[in-house]
Image (cartoon, helix red, strand yellow):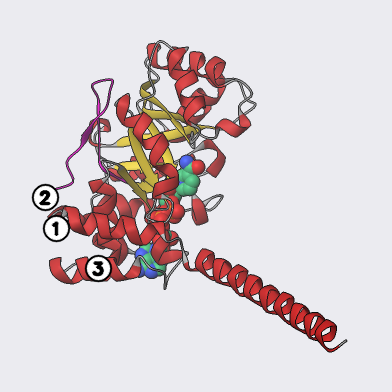
Amino acid sequence: MPLEPILLNDGNKIPAIAYGTGSKMKYHDITQYIEQAIEVGFSHIDTAAFYQTEKYVGKAIKESGLARSELFITTKYPRDVPIQKSVKESLANLGLQYLDLYLIHQPLFIPDIVKTWKDFEKVQQDGLAKSIGISNVVDVQQLEHLIKHSEVKPAVNQIELHPYNYYKMKPIMDVCAKHKIVVEAYSSLSPITTYPGGPVDVPLKAAAQRIGATPTQVVFLWVKAKGAVIVTTSTTKAHMEEYLAVSDLPDLTKEEVADIDAAGAKGPPSDIAARLAINTKEKALGVVIVMIFLVYGWGRICY
Ligand SMILES: NC(=O)c1ccc[n+]([C@@H]2O[C@H](COP(=O)([O-])OP(=O)(O)OC[C@H]3O[C@@H](n4cnc5c(N)ncnc54)[C@H](OP(=O)(O)O)[C@@H]3O)[C@@H](O)[C@H]2O)c1
């Protein structure tokens, strides 16, 4: 089933997969990779003032010769700078008249999210961003507080989401679903990039074999099954093509999604190893206590 654009709660549509220009690409001239991504078929580009990659996205957009309407551009508000000033700087860097999506990058750096959001509503009213949203809001109470005190609901919440943190993220995802806030998933390839060799590998491989896909593509199908937008990145054409080819793959079955969820709930290999180490320490302590008891008890019996 193709990766169809997803409807936002403000009536706009968002392409279901984005090419990111953050993480290891931050602060680098990555124009060639963005150009490659657009050439391969990505229409949704994710950047942020903090990444310092907006000007390279702008360069690649210009080089592409594509009409503005053919691209979906997201950037993010950093911190400290007045919002009207920051959004205008981002637009200048990108060479654009408007953003498709403007996000509060990190609520931890924002003293009053409700106040900041009022300025975001103004950015949208002024036509500088078609949609507005949040990122890294993982505290249910914070999101509910924001919604309660705002005119406009966030259209998206961009969060870290992969099988190993799914259960941790589920409460915030449930609140997002209640308010039709689309979740965007970054770092979803963590089972492959950060935690290889963990329990999730088994169901990923099984599903990959059934549908003739790669484990990477199965992770993205899992993100799709959760109704989230995939926010990924790559420096290689082969990986970019592999990502977009997810569009030609069938959906995972409910059982496959459940198997990945269950394996993810066991935690990444590092957590399992840590738990085993704790168990081993507890067992060793138990043995020492029993030995002390035996020696002491034996001594008293002998005495
Ligand atoms: N809002 C936020 O706070 C926030 C935080 C983090 C990220 N993001 C956004 O999300 C984007 C993506 O983040 P991410 O990099 O964490 O996403 P990801 O999709 O989890 O990982 C992408 C990385 O996976 C690597 N990869 C792909 N296939 C692989 C394989 N088979 N084996 C080993 N490595 C493989 C790619 O490397 P190659 O270059 O070799 O293909 C690439 O570096 C960022 O660029 C940014 O736009 C947002």
Query: Magenta residues, as a range?
Result: 1-18
Which of the two labelled residues, at mark 3 and mark 1, occupies the earlier sequence position?
3
Number of other residues with Cα within 10 Å of mark 3, as a class: few under 14, some 14 to 19, many 20 or more:
some
Mark 1 CB in 8 Å range of ligand 1?
A: no
Q: Are marks 2 and 1 in contact (CB under 8 Å)?
A: yes
Image-quadrant location for residue 18? top left
- The residue wearing badge 2 is 1
Q: Which mark is residue 214?
A: 3
Amino acid carrying mark 1 in the image? Leu
Amino acid carrying mark 3 in the image? Thr
Location of residue 256 with respect to 38 vertically, above or below: below
Location of residue 230 with respect to 132 vertically, above or below: below
Which of the two labelled residues, at mark 2 and mark 1, occupies the earlier sequence position?
2
Q: Position of residue 175 (x, y in %)?
A: 37, 29
Dot 3 falls on a residue whose secondary structure is loop
Q: Position of residue 231 (x, y in %)?
A: 36, 47
Q: CA distance from mark 2 to mark 3?
A: 16 Å
Q: Residue at x 51, y 33 (%)?
A: 139
Q: Position of residue 61 (x, y in %)?
A: 34, 41
Which of the two labelled residues, at mark 2 and mark 3, occupies the earlier sequence position?
2
Q: Main secondary structure of the magenta part?
A: loop
Q: Let me know if residue 60 is in the magenta part.
A: no
- The residue wearing badge 1 is 249
Mark 3 CB in 8 Å range of ligand 1?
A: yes
Q: Residue at x 53, y 67 (%)?
A: 270
Amino acid carrying mark 2 in the image? Met
Q: Which mark is residue 137?
A: none
Image-quadrant location for residue 40? bottom left
Number of labels in the image equals 3
